[in-house]
């Protein structure tokens, strides 16, 4: 059982693929390089979507659940206010 220590470029690329599929601007997303347990998807006070990778869940399993986690926290109106 290996824990994820750092979010790699390959992980970020795959996360951005999910973001692109959901038609969310990459500029509206923050992905910290340090995973946490548990991982979290939340809207920050500045309106950006923060995606923190789960340190203990297998990355592929976590990534598969990511679209649902994003949809739970995104407002119905996803237009940018900037």
Image (spheres, grey):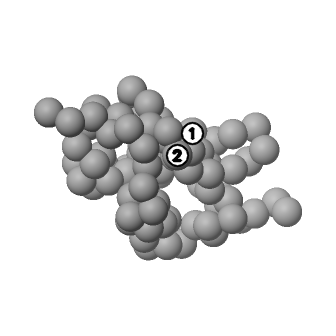
Q: Which residue is nearer to you in this view: 82 or 11? A: 11
Spot the residue most to the left: 1
**Taking 82 as reference, is 62 left or right?**
left
Q: Which residue is nearer to you in this view: 6 or 23? A: 6
How many neighbours does mark 2 have within 10 angstroms: few (below 14), some (14-19), or many (20 or more)? Answer: some
User: In this view of the protein, can residue 75 be seen by the observer?
Assistant: no
Give residue 56's quadrant in the image: top left
Q: Which residue is drawn at 56% across and 45% down?
A: 32
Give the quarter of the figure containing the N terminus.
top left
User: In this view of the protein, can residue 21 be seen by the observer?
Assistant: yes
**CA separation in Å, label 1 and label 2:** 16 Å
Give residue 17's quadrant in the image: bottom left
Dot placed on the residue nearer the N-terminal end, 1 or 2: 2
Spot the residue most to the top: 37
Q: Which residue is drawn at 61% across and 67% down?
A: 26
Question: In the rendered image, which residue does mark 1 sit on?
Answer: 42
Give SS at disc 1: strand
Q: Position of residue 16 (x, y in %)?
A: 48, 66
Question: In the rendered image, which residue does mark 2 sit on?
Answer: 33
């Amino acid at each position: 059982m290996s824990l994820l220590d750092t979010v790699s470029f390959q992980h970020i690329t795959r996360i951005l693929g999910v973001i692109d599929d959901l038609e969310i601007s990459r500029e509206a997303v923050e992905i910290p390089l340090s995973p946490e347990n548990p991982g979290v998807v939340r809207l920050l006070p500045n309106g950006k979507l923060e995606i923190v990778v789960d340190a203990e869940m297998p990355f592929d399993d976590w990534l598969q659940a990511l679209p649902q986690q994003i949809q739970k926290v995104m407002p119905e109106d996803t237009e940018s206010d900037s």
